[in-house]
Image: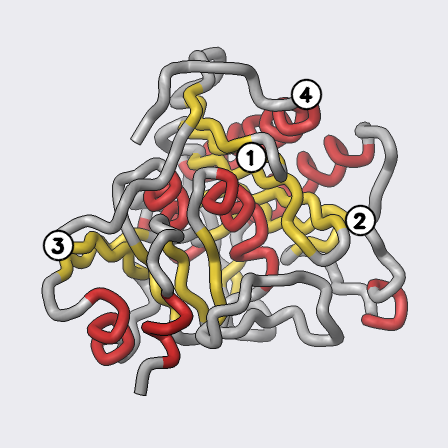
Amino acid sequence: MSMPPGTMPPELARQVGAIARAAGAAILDVYHGDFAVQTKADASPLTAADLAAQQVIMAGLAALEPVLPVLSEEAKALPWSERRHWPRYWLVDPLDGTREFIKRNGEFTVNIALIDDHRSALGVVLAPVSGELYVAAQGQGAWLQTQAEAPWQRIRSRPLGQPALVAGSRSHGGVQGDVLQQLVGDDYQLIPLGSSLKFCLIARGAADLYLRLGLTSEWDTAAAQCVLEEAGGAVLDLAGQPFRYNRGESLLNPEFVAVGDTTIDWTARLLAP
């Protein structure tokens, strides 16, 4: 649900948004041509677009002050012995939803987050095909810019709908029915959607919940978590605790639920017998 165009996002959020738009342009250059698909060691796909976006983002972040470390899906992860001393760093997924990119369905994003003391303090999510850019900064709000140069709109999540609209993964199914029933009852509608766009749909008041049972990595969620939290929602593990980052050697997230309506006691529903 959009609020009237209000104040601009803070300067750093706008700067990182511009980096994301440049990465999106590099992705679309590949998207509109012929591209090969490689397979990474973990069996996930990789294209020239992932690597092109990575280069644009790394160069863009290196030009910002102060220069901070960068942890990215498409770069070798540094060992925990080094990362554990980072109070602030950039957490990047240059192309989230490579499977959607390969299917050419447009449901992929560029994700850039600033992690400060284990929290997602700034988040930028770009959908290159639609041109929609979401940005948020801790304590300052969340915004949507529908196209480059368009006015910024403040966004807010909505009260839980009846029936609830549940955003679900297009490429990663799973047995979720029991947990969804625990959270929203039997009466809900499923909206299949790829990448971090599921969080953004909740943040703008167009969906209510996204349940993820199965593996994700920290760079998959950090940017969109900030957008959703600043729009009034939350991202919780299945014990009801908010997500934190750079917690240890593993970069895998626990299973989680992203919600728009924080007036509901989701923890009680998650932990109900």
What amino acid type should be assigned to the residue bearing mark 1? Answer: Ala
In the rendered image, the vertical position of residue 170 relative to residue 101, given as above or below: below
Crowdedness near tag 1: few (<14), some (14–19) or many (≥20) residues, C-alpha within 10 Å: many
The answer to which quarter of the image holds residue 5 is top left
Q: Earlier in the sequence, mark 3 or mark 4?
A: 4
Of the residues tagged 3 and 2, which is closer to the observer?
A: 3
In the rendered image, the vertical position of residue 86 relative to residue 27, given as above or below: below
What amino acid type should be assigned to the residue bearing mark 3? Answer: Pro
Q: Which mark is residue 136?
A: 1
Find residue 55 and report its horizontal and vertical position in percent.
69, 40
Q: Please say if the residues under marks 1 and 4 sit with CB atoms less than 8 Å apart.
A: no
- What whole-number distance in Å separates the C-alpha atoms at marks 3 and 4? 38 Å
Residue depicted at x 37% and y 64%: 265
Find residue 165 and report its horizontal and vertical position in percent.
20, 52
Q: Which mark is residue 88?
A: 2
Q: Which residue, given by chain and number where applicable, does mark 4 sit on?
A: 11
Q: Which residue, given by chain and number where applicable, does mark 3 sit on?
A: 163
Q: Earlier in the sequence, mark 3 or mark 2?
A: 2
